Amino acid sequence: MNTGQLTSILPLILLVVVFYFLLIRPQRKRQQEAAQMQNSLTPGARVMTTTGLFGTVVTVENDDVVLEVAPGIETRWVKAAIGRVVTPGEPTADDPVADEPLTDDVPDTAGTDKDGTTGTTGSTPERNDGQDTTKS
């Protein structure tokens, strides 16, 4: 093999090596971690499915998991559908975040006149059955 052939094949070899270390190896590692997590499921664990449904593991059978999604409502899922185990301190989509206020910080100024009093004096347009009318 001469150096001309080696230099033409070298970029292909480097491309395969880069794909292995950047794509194939991390994907295999994620698959192994997911399989390990799915095999270590125990009753009482709070989990999230890959579709975003939160539930509590009731029973674990061969390749199936029974999740309680609401009190008294149980559904059967395959283990591969379990995306992650939710830790107790981790907020979920159905839990409100403690830092966020429940209402806006903007004061409600709807229904107040220019002088700050409540009422409908003046000629403000209103919606009435799909027709614009003005009060006089």
Image (cartoon, grey):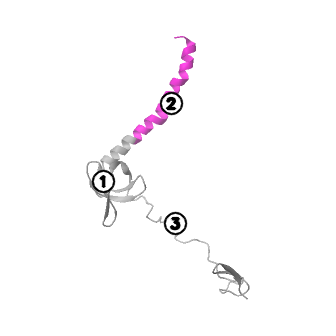
Q: Report the residue at 67% width, 81% height from top.
A: 126
Residue 115 pos. (x, y %):
71, 84
Q: Residue 123 occupies which quadrant of the picture?
A: bottom right
Check residue 22 for magenta coloring: yes
Q: Which residue is under mark 2?
A: 18
- Left or right side of 30 for 119: right
How crowded pointer 3 is (Cα within 10 Å; few <14, some 14-19, many 20+) is rated as: few
Mark 1 and mark 2: Cα distance apart in space: 38 Å
Mark positioned earlier in the residue sequence (2 or 3): 2
Q: Report the residue at 45% width, 61% height from top.
A: 93
Q: Amino acid at mark 1?
A: Val
95, above or below 42, in the image: below
Mark positioned earlier in the residue sequence (1 or 3): 1
Q: Report the residue at 37% width, 45% height from top.
A: 34
Mark positioned earlier in the residue sequence (1 or 2): 2
Q: Which residue is under mark 3?
A: 100
Magenta residues (range): 1-30
Q: Is residue 98 visible?
A: yes
Residue 14 pos. (x, y %):
52, 25
Q: Amino acid at mark 3?
A: Glu
103, above or below 46, in the image: below
> In front: 88, or 58?
58
Q: Which mark is residue 65?
A: 1
Q: Residue 29 occupies which quadrant of the picture?
A: top left
Front: mark 1 or 3: 1
- Left or right side of 26 for 37: left
SS for callout 1: strand
